Amino acid sequence: MAQVTVAKLIAEALLINDVKRIYGIIGTSILDFIDALYDYRDRINFITTRHEQVAVSAADGEARVTANFGVAAVHEGPGFMNSLISLAIAMKDRIPVLLITGGVRRRLRGTDAWLKVDHESIAKAIVKKYLRISKSNEAIEILGEAFRNLSTYPRGPVVIEVPEDIWNEKVELKSENLELLKIKEAIPERLPQNIVKEIANSLINSKRPLILACGELVYNKYFESQYLISLAEKTGSYIVTSGNARGACSEDHERSLGRCGFGGGNIVADNTIENCDFLLVLGNEFDDITTYAYTLLPKGEVFVISKDNSVNKRPRYYEFLNYEPLSFLKELNEQISGKYTHNKKYA
């Protein structure tokens, strides 16, 4: 057992989860955290930005590229307020970002103190979870809750508020407690073989099958383009992507039609969506963007594979199956092994 400060506990917890960079701007309410990071400078790089919106945006970008969560640290009040646009973007795109924000000293809470705004009320609609460490002995539990929210579906940003006077308080830390904070690999879910087989047969038997790849599919550290290309080649399907899934496969590949939808889609991809007779959506973005506010819809069946229950809020032009998209994609590839179809036409 060892005693460490709350600031060093957070640094250790980030380190054990392979965090290599923190983006942010130094302010008095997080100064003790920045000081603690000096002892980790060879393992965690604190990158100073010019604006808090940029800090959270950089953390968002890191999460998309690495398939780990990104981390930003900002000063309370105005620093936190400056981060809101990027938090909202991360929430809309389901990107796991951890924002560590300073907070007013505990004895000044509720006194309309300098820089004090109600972070939690402001952030409630644009983050997955808002947490506050109000006692040092809560820190381990709160960090564990933050990491659980960052690693479970649907993903999104999480905020931890740390009052300025708590960073240097000591906590008892056992090595096994720190190990419990490490994000564990999700246990693979059992996929219903009858449903997988049904969709596999639909892709094979359709005249104009199409696969829509979404960010939820590609923001997974185990995703490889070959899984997507292989399924398209085996079934004679074409591939289109949402904006968040650009790069899911090379757009020079003969099976790729590029991005679809509002704000960057191309006419070939859009027309193919409208004319396909079976659409398999791998992720949560069969939405108003990819369908031009639901005015461009396929003529055939649509199956959406996603762990994001928010798709239930949308007009239901599809069958929704609550499964992890990458696991489903891999299972489809196994089901269709050796069955190749190349003569399908989309004219």
Image (cartoon, rainbow, N blue to C red):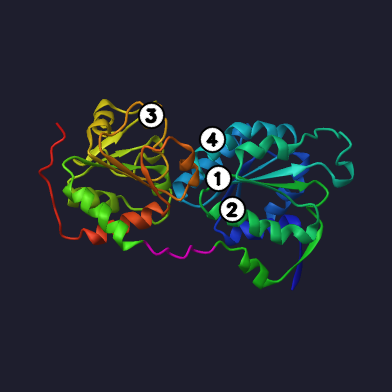
User: Which one is closest to the eye, mark 3 or mark 1?
Assistant: 3
Secondary structure mainly formed by the magenta segment: loop
Q: Amino acid at mark 1?
A: Gly
Q: Are marks 3 and 4 in contact (CB under 8 Å)?
A: no
Image position, residue 300 (x, y; %): 25, 38
Local SS, label 4: helix
The residue located at (80%, 46%) in the rendering is 164
Residue beneath label 1, please? 156
* Upstream in sequence: badge 3 or badge 4: 4
Q: Amino acid at mark 4?
A: Ile
Image position, residue 209 (x, y; %): 22, 42
Q: Name the quarter where the C terminus is drawn.
A: top left
> Residue 76 versus residue 342: which sits nearer the camera?
342
User: Which one is closest to the eye, mark 2 or mark 3?
Assistant: 3
Label 2 crowd bin: few (<14), some (14–19), many (20+), radius 10 Å: some
Residue beneath label 2, please? 149
Give the residues in magenta: 184-191
The CA span between labels 3 and 1 is 25 Å
The CA span between labels 2 and 4 is 17 Å
Is 189 a magenta residue?
A: yes
Q: Is residue 213 above or below residue 149?
A: above
Local SS, label 1: loop
Q: Quadrant of residue 182?
A: bottom right
As drawn, which residue projects farthest toward the left? 343
Q: Amino acid at mark 2?
A: Asn
